[in-house]
Amino acid sequence: MENISVMGDPDKLREECGVFGIYDFAGGDVSSAVYYGLLALQHRGQESCGIAVSDTKGPKGKVLSAKEMGLVNESFTPEMLEKLKGDIGVGHVRYSTAGSSTRENAQPLVLNYVKGTLGLAHNGNLINAPELRHELEYTGAIFQTTIDSEVIAYHIARERLNTNTVEAAVGRAMQKIKGAYSLVIMSPRKLIGARDPFGFRPLCIGKREDAYVLASETCALDTIGAQYIRDVLPGEVVTISPEKGIESDTSHCISDKEHSRCVFEYIYFARPDSYIDGVSVYNSRILAGKFLAMDSPVEADLVVGVPESGNCAALGYSLQSGIPYGQAFVKNSYVGRTFIKPKQKNRETSVQVKLNALKEAVSGKRVIMIDDSIVRGTTSDRIVRMLREAGAKEVHMRVSSPPFLWPCYFGTDVPAREQLIAYNRSIEEICEVIGADSLAYLKEERLEEMVNGLGVCKGCFSGTYPLVPPTEDIRGDYDM
């Protein structure tokens, strides 16, 4: 695998990717629905985007696709969407956690093979991609990309030669691939969704009139006016066709107690208006703030969040503690989420460009500042300093996740241990580094409580992973 690009802000986790699929049984064009679905999922990746569509009543191998680097609304014009005619389609927004930031690595991947075509969009990270890739290369496979998604596509295509249906091929490929994946796959006459047995990444099903939808988050369903039906179960393969509606294969499912959803979907990645596996993301963040107030109280005059993802937890802290909730920062809305824009060189100004402290709000006050995480600590110290320069008397930092102590191998770019501020440092030492008056993290045992008892992955906090991690770091070298 090639280098991973680290985006502008070094102290923020990068998003996952977003996947979207739709099949209109009435035969209507779906490209605009895919476009609006991707706009709703834009927060999951701003590096590249793509749409692939097919006409199920037309020639079997014909897929129309467009892929671009950058934002959805900047990449697709009305004229482009008009040309993408088809009643079945898949879309993708990407942030690279494996594979470099290039147009070739943009998704969906479109594969032409002996049985027709496959359009595939993938969110997640495989931990055995290198060996699967080498195995395929030694049997003559030629790769066009450096992403693990192409390995999945190849395996599905190969298995399809030995099975009667594409969904059976997906199931057989799932026996070989290991790691985190939510897949949306378009075959000539079917739309298929699959989720890894641990449920690392989200995937849900919706319906709008005669069309069925698959999406990473429920907010994408809301955006196009689709009704939420249910989540795809961890380990489930769903097949959507006009003949049979939704078919379900649960033969790869494991017990609920083994499920290991990425808890950062709830803490940070997902939009607050989404529901994942029946749990409100907004409510999870409110609860995280309430737990911080219960477990790590401090006397103060004001509770503030670091926009955007710290705001809900700050409101939860305020509700629990009775300390007023307020706004301490003005965010420049036109910057976008700078930290997921590739290769931004001028890191030192990225925080100041994005945020400015409200002197009137914080001057002379004891402030509790809540953020979702501290990775390297480089941003936190600047934001603490910003509040002090705006006249804050005290700055107490509270973090709505436990400290990062281990890397992630499942699609979240938690870096090597040596780069983590919490590695080999006590809470007091971290507090000193970032310049706060006090510091406290969410307790690890609160995580399940925060998500209504669902099984979550705690690997980056505890070093205990649901799958044995690779012996070498498969995530590539960080392009600092």
Image (tube, rainbow, N blue to C red):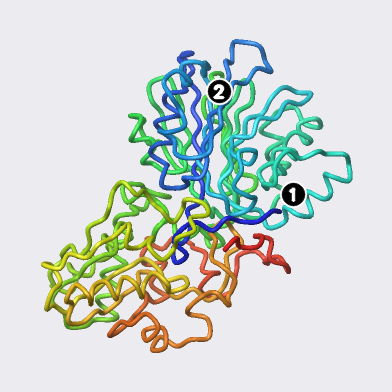
Q: Position of residue 453 (x, y in %)?
A: 41, 63
Residue topped by disc 2: 53
- The quarter in which the C terminus is drawn is bottom right
Q: Foreground residue, 365 or 35?
A: 365
Please report the residue visible at 43 percent of the width from the left and 29 percent of the height from the top. 35
Residue topped by disc 1: 176
Q: Position of residue 51 (x, y in %)?
A: 53, 29
Q: Is residue 339 left or right of residue 260?
A: left
Please report the residue visible at 56 percent of the width from the left and 27 percent of the height from the top. 66
Circle count? 2
Q: Quadrant of residue 108?
A: top right
Q: Is residue 183 left or right of residue 427?
A: right
Q: Foreground residue, 109 or 227?
A: 109
Circle 1 packing at 10 Å, graded few (<14), some (14-19), many (20+), is few
Please report the residue visible at 53 percent of the width from the left and 65 percent of the height from the top. 414
- The quarter in which the N terminus is drawn is bottom right
Quick check: 205 above or below 309?
above
Q: Are marks 1 and 2 in contact (CB under 8 Å)?
A: no
Q: Is residue 340 left or right of residue 299?
A: right
Three-letter code for the amino acid on which mark 2 is drawn: Val
For marks 1 and 2 on the same chain, the one whose residue lies earlier in the sequence: 2
Q: Position of residue 349 (x, y in %)?
A: 38, 62
Q: Position of residue 113 (x, y in %)?
A: 76, 26
Quick check: 96 above or below 110?
below
Three-letter code for the amino acid on which mark 1 is drawn: Lys
Q: Foreground residue, 63 or 466?
A: 63
Badge 2 marks a residue whose secondary structure is strand
Q: Nearer the viewer, mark 1 or mark 2?
A: 2
Circle 2 packing at 10 Å, graded few (<14), some (14-19), many (20+), is many
